Image (spheres, rainbow, N blue to C red):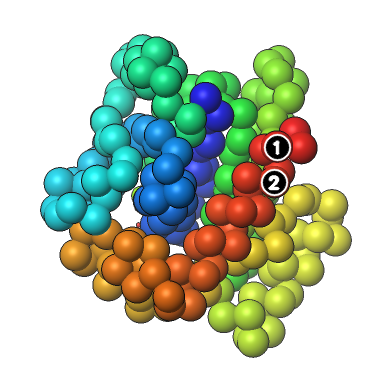
């Protein structure tokens, strides 16, 4: 089972949207997907109770003292992928998620403040990972308008510093927020739409990275 955490200490950067979109996509592809909502606000867990749009994914919540047990339970159930959604602020839960993951995605909105916090998050991962095993770490641009100067500048700033960023980004689109409204994701609601295409490209890119890792 591959464990993928969505981590950044900046709130509202798109962790839950990314995690649910990837989870539903992989679930639709036939993978057995688990999801641990380790954010005390339990946003993803609550969304999963809204409708049938998340039925391809099995959701659980976890606190710091239950996280490892929940991960093990999903492993024992034979899941292929596990997504861990984390709080958008400094928390021991973030460290626990990082330590227990194979892959860490750092969502970043195109803004200088998000950039600074994403770098702090990357440095935290580096500190923790030194004492543990090798991890696949990637930034993912979210809520981005790639025609804007700021989005292109932030992407360039990430690359100039030799941080690894996914080629595929999530654009700022109402389709993501609207899908969440009805308890689902664009892959389920508008499978032929542009947002679904972005999800498919990002999920395929991550599949490739995990295969080569
Ligand atoms: N690509 C996108 N386009 C438009 N809106 C988006 C996109 N991604 C996320 N949003 C919206 O931005 C808000 C924050 O997104 P989300 O809840 O995924 O972030 P988060 O990092 O999980 O936040 P928190 O730290 O509070 O858990 C939500 O209202 C969501 O619908
Ligand atoms: Mg969230």
Q: Quick one: label 1, few (<14), some, or many (20+) residues within 10 Å?
A: few
Q: How many labels does the image show?
A: 2
Contact, CB < 8 Å: mark 1 with mark 2?
yes
Q: Is mark 1 on a helix, strand or loop?
A: helix
C-alpha gap between disc 1 and disc 2: 5 Å
22 displayed left or right of 178: right
Image coords of residue 173 (percent x, y): 42, 77
Name the residue: 61% across, 35% down: 103
Q: Mark 1 points at which residue?
A: 211
61 displayed left or right of 187: left
Image coords of residue 43 (percent x, y): 25, 48
Looking at the image, which residue sits at the far front? Answer: 30
Mark 1 CB in 8 Å range of ligand 1? no
Q: Above or below — where is 159 with respect to 197?
A: above
Q: Name the residue under label 2.
A: 208
210 displayed left or right of 51: right
Q: Is mark 2 on a helix, strand or loop?
A: helix
Question: Which quadrant of the figure has residue 107?
Answer: bottom right
Q: Above or below — where is 212 with respect to 8?
A: above
Whether residue 108 can be seen here: no
Name the residue: 78% across, 50% down: 163
Image coords of residue 187 (percent x, y): 39, 63
């Amino acid at each position: 089972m591959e464990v993928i955490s969505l981590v950044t200490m900046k709130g509202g950067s798109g962790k839950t949207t990314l995690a649910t979109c990837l989870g539903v996509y992989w679930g639709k592809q036939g993978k057995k997907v688990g999801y641990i909502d380790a954010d005390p606000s339990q946003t993803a867990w609550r969304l999963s109770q809204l409708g049938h749009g998340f039925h391809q994914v099995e959701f659980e919540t976890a606190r710091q003292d239950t996280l490892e047990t929940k991960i093990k339970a999903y492993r024992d159930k034979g899941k292929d992928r596990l997504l861990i959604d984390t709080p958008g602020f400094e928390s021991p839960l973030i460290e626990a998620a990082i330590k227990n993951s194979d892959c860490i995605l750092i969502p970043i909105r195109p803004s200088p403040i998000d950039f600074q916090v994403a770098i702090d998050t990357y440095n935290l991962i580096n500190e923790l990972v030194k004492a543990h095993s090798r991890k696949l770490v990637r930034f993912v641009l979210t809520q981005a308008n790639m025609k804007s100067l700021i989005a292109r500048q932030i992407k360039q700033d990430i690359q100039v510093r030799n941080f690894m960023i996914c080629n595929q980004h999530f654009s700022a689109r109402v389709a993501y927020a609207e899908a969440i409204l009805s308890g689902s994701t664009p892959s389920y609601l508008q499978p032929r739409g542009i947002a679904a295409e972005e999800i498919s490209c990002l999920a395929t890119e991550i599949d490739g990275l995990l295969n080569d890792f």
